[in-house]
């Protein structure tokens, strides 16, 4: 297969970026999107004649290459992780594109994700939100026997649905407001569904939402692009659950929450 | 050189209890005065950092990814073992210990493995309390499934994402400590050297991957939890960034590398399809609970399948060879990984492989008929989806195609009972050490080991070491040893940048992978290994004279990171083959063609090789020196494994 790639190139956070167009041919339809970019980079390194514009290889984040670590994330033809549904960039395959197509490749763009180089952005803000309360405070070694608290199967399943989030940031990139509500909602809901997470539920939601705002993420205006683009198809109902908990927490006194 | 495994006296059941009773402690007030560096945020590193931070030590934790949650533990699919015996099928601590020793083909240290089995149940308790959403039954109690090498169901799981959920549990505990200020997190750092002062591990040199800056970090003690070295084969189920560099730098500073040849080839991975391929994807072992492995019996069917003239489901039952069920009726499709992998290779070598000739079927037809598609989807949905995205075939309708691939490394830095290497103050946890899996790891036991090490073992053993360090003030990085290490790192980076040759890092890495797979893969021979060693030596020269690293060292430069890692992998490759050559027996994942039974099973030579083979660095151009730790079996009897 053959493609024309328009790729965002930017040396570092301070310099100005621009699109550079590359033509690439001889790509197997079975190769993954990142393998296609690997081949572009190999040709750039080798100064291969088939590449129209010489230069440094293109930088992009990746690691597991099987859709679970959340490291990869490219904005492809205007969509986070590209045209296929329910996949990450590393799981996207070239057979999903037409031969000869032009593909526009950009980094995640959001105020809370400063650019590092080319297609690599800084998603530290997502960790900062988790540090604000995305945990259950249990000391190592102080846990009770695992089966002493039965958890209804349907709740365990719901918690697992929410916990499947891989923290890639596609929801933020998809959102017109750069909001992280799906990411935060998923974590809040995962823990709130479980009996183990209940004692801290109110404090958790308040604290995480506050830090989310502080990190520069936008508000949710119910566009639902996040759910549509989420590679793990995490549902916006978790946002609703978070909103309910958040309202309830705001009605409680500080003493009750702490 | 003398090495002492420091195994506590007494019967196996009471060794750990006795150790804990005798171990020295560090008081809470003194913990604040102690700095600990932990490299790695996988199950091992994150659980250790969270636990030690919570105890009040000053912890600095490093990872190369942008977030600790992305460590490769995240990719573990199938599950984690524990001896809870919830299904009431006769499990207990001794049985889990025994299965793990036997699965490892009697090449691991009894005392460590027993302790692992002993703490396994606490891991499940801890994870559940953290909110890990394990699979449950309708009554609300935890569910179990079966894994290879065991006749009981002791594997806990969270759909096909067990590693993800356990890692997120450890990551949440770690995040809590970061918020509390006990742990400092440094992401996007490549640890490129270990610093020793007066023979003790006192710090690391890190390269900031964004700015290229070389940083010094000092502490009272250093813990490595950097994962496995499977990427020496280029294609493996490991993450692209997985590397041996911190472990290799420790080796070059005198730490012993134990059993480097013990690598695990996992039987159920998606087959290789093209030379541009960048990694291999695992299909979890849990699938062997319900999937049946087969190839056609008739060669003409094989040809027709390869030419796509017929489909697998056109082949009638009587013309299928369920070779695992045929050869191993007692364990059937659930034999250990090494056995299943070799059996697949045997069928493919005999000409019965499908697809490219290097694939066998994993078929869910019977399970779907028996349990219904819905139930199969609930259990394995994400794995089936993963398969479909890669292969573009629907595994609910046609069998999966699978082939063995490099997956896990049992070898690693040598550690004693306290998980300390032979360098005082250098602890090694998780896949990076050699400790618990002998010559073959059983499924669902790496997650168990990583978390056992980090939550339940290291916090005790590190205190026993640190108790004698409390009078030493916080280290600074002004010591000449830091300056020297930093200079070496900078020199080696500029050497890499200046080769300016013609071949890309990936190109050379792929060649290394081919050499390793051909000469040090599933079937090893004396002749092949000797040839392989020569090839790797030549490749090392080729690398240092012909690699091309574009860009500069002062920016984010992935090619430079990969080049540094590859330099270490190449050196490791040679030592792996030296180890494989030395071990003139077959055991677990190490299969020497010269040493097999008439039925083609692995043939051990206990009289000569019941030892851990440790390799000591002796200089750039001299061969590593062998240092043995004899293994003593007191609680179990040395036996030939039998899964028939
Ligand atoms: C696909 C797959 C599926 C698996 N499924 C199972 C399963 O079902 N059950 C089971 O028990 N086991 C399974 N395993 C094995 C198990 O997941 C691993 O052995 C285990 O998770 C390793 O954990 P770890 O903490 O030792 O290392 P890792 O999780 O690999 O973490 C390594 C850490 O070290 C850091 N690091 C590495 N190098 C550097 C460096 N140079 N500088 C700085 N930091 C560095 C990384 O950033 C990372 O944080 C599976 C493995 C794979 C690959
Ligand atoms: S590289 Fe891990 S999710 Fe894509």
Image: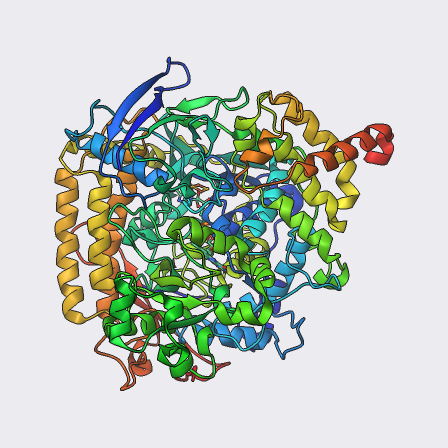
Q: Where is residue A138 in the image (x, y as percent from the top left)?
A: 70, 48
Q: Which residue is drawn at 38% across and 19% down?
A: A12
Q: Left or right of A84: which side holds B2?
A: left
Q: Where is residue B597 in the image (x, y as percent from the top left)?
A: 28, 84
Q: Left or right of B110: which side holds B246?
A: left
Visible residue check, residue B413: no
Q: Nearer the viewer, residue B97 or B53?
A: B97
Q: Left or right of B533: which side holds A222?
A: right
Q: Nearer the viewer, residue A1 or B506?
A: A1
Placement of the N terminus of chain B among the 4 image quadrants: bottom left
Q: Position of residue B528 (x, y in %)?
A: 16, 66
Q: Is residue B485 above or below residue B312?
A: above
Visible residue check, residue B257: yes
Quadrant assignment, res B404: bottom left
Q: Left or right of A160: which side holds B407?
A: left
Q: Where is residue B371 in the image (x, y as percent from the top left)?
A: 59, 69
Question: In the image, ligand 2 is in what quadrant?
Answer: top left
């Amino acid at each position: 297969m053959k493609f024309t790639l328009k790729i965002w190139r930017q040396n570092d956070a301070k310099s100005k970026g621009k699109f550079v167009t590359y033509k690439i041919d001889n790509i197997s339809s079975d190769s993954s999107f990142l393998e296609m970019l690997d081949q572009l980079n190999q040709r750039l390194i080798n100064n291969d004649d088939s590449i129209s514009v010489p230069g440094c290889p293109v930088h992009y984040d990746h690691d597991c290459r099987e859709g679970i670590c959340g490291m990869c994330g490219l904005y492809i033809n205007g969509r986070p992780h590209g045209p296929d549904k329910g996949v990450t960039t590393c799981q996207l395959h070239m057979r999903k594109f037409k031969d000869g197509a032009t593909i526009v490749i950009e980094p995640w763009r959001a105020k809370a994700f400063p650019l590092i180089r080319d297609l690599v952005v800084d998603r530290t803000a997502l960790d900062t939100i988790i540090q604000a309360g995305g945990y259950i405070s249990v000391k190592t070694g102080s846990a009770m026997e695992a089966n002493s608290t039965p958890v209804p199967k349907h709740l365990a399943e719901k918690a697992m649905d929410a916990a499947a989030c891989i923290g890639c940031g596609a929801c933020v990139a998809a959102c017109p407001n750069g909001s992280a509500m799906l990411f935060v909602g998923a974590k809040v809901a995962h823990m709130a569904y479980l009996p183990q997470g209940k004692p801290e539920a109110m404090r958790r939601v308040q604290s995480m939402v506050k830090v989310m705002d502080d990190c520069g993420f936008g508000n949710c205006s119910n566009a639902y692009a996040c759910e549509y683009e989420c590679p793990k198809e995490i549902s916006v109902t978790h946002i609703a659950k978070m909103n309910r908990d958040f309202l309830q927490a705001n009605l409680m006194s500080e003493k009750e929450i702490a | 050189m003398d090495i002492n495994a420091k195994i506590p006296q007494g019967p196996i059941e009471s060794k750990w209890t006795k150790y804990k009773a005798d171990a020295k402690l560090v008081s809470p007030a003194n913990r604040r005065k102690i700095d600990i560096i932990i490299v790695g945020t996988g199950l091992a590193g994150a659980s250790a950092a969270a636990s030690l931070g919570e105890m009040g030590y000053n912890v600095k934790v490093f990872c190369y990814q942008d977030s600790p949650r992305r460590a490769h533990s995240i990719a573990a699919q199938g599950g984690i073992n524990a001896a809870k015996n919830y299904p009431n099928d006769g499990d207990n601590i001794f049985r889990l210990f025994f299965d793990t020793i036997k699965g490892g083909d009697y090449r691991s240290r009894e005392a460590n493995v027993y302790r692992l089995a002993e703490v396994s149940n606490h891991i499940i308790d801890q994870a559940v309390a953290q909110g890990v959403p394990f699979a449950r039954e309708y009554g609300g109690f935890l569910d179990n499934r079966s894994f290879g090498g065991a006749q009981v169901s002791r594997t806990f799981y969270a759909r096909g994402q067990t590693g993800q959920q356990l890692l997120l549990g450890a990551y949440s505990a770690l995040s809590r400590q970061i918020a509390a200020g006990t742990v400092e997190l440094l992401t996007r750092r490549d640890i490129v050297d270990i610093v020793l002062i007066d023979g003790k591990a006192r710090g690391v040199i890190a390269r900031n991957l964004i700015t290229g800056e070389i940083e010094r970090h000092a502490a009272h003690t250093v813990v490595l939890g950097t994962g496995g070295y499977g990427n020496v084969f280029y294609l493996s189920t490991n993450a692209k960034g997985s590397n041996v560099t911190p472990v290799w730098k420790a080796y070059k500073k005198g730490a012993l590398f134990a059993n480097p040849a013990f690598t695990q080839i996992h039987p159920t991975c998606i087959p290789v399809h093209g030379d541009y391929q960048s990694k291999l994807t695992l299909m979890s072992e849990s699938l062997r609970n319900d999937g049946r492995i087969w190839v056609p019996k008739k060669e003409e069917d094989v040809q027709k399948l390869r030419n796509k003239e017929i489909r697998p489901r056109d082949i009638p039952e009587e013309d299928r060879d369920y070779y695992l069920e045929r050869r191993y009726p007692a364990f059937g499709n659930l034999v250990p990984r090494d056995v299943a992998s070799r059996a697949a290779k045997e069928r493919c070598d005999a000409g019965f492989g499908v697809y490219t000739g290097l694939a066998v079927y994993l078929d869910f037809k019977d399970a779907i008929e028996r349990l219904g598609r819905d139930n199969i989807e609930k259990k394995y949905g994400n794995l089936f989806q993963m398969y479909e995205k890669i292969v573009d075939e629907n595994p609910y309708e046609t069998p999966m195609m699978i082939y063995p691939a490099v997956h896990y490394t049992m070898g690693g830095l040598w550690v004693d009972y306290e998980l300390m290497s032979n360098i005082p103050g250098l602890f090694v946890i998780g896949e990076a050490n050699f400790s618990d899996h002998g010559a073959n790891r059983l499924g669902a036991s790496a997650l168990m080991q990583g978390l056992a090490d980090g939550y339940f073992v290291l916090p005790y053993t590190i205190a026993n070491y640190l108790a004698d360090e409390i009078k030493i003030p916080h280290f600074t990085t002004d010591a000449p040893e830091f300056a020297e290490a930093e200079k070496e790192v900078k020199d080696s980076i500029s050497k890499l940048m200046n080769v300016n040759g013609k071949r890309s890092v990936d190109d050379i890495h792929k060649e290394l992978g081919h050499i390793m797979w051909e000469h040090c893969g599933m079937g090893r021979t004396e002749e092949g290994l000797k040839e392989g060693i020569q090839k790797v030596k030549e490749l090392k020269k080729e690398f240092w004279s012909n690699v091309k690293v574009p860009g500069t060292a002062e920016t984010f430069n992935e090619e430079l990171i990969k080049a540094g890692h590859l330099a270490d992998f190449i050196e490791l490759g040679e030592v792996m083959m030296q180890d494989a050559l030395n071990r003139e027996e077959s055991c677990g994942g190490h299969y020497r063609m010269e040493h097999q039974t008439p039925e083609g099973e692995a043939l051990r030579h206990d009289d000569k090789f019941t030892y851990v083979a440790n390799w000591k660095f002796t200089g750039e151009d001299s061969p590593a020196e062998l240092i043995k730790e004899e293994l003593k079996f007191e609680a179990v009897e040395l036996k030939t494994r039998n899964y028939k």
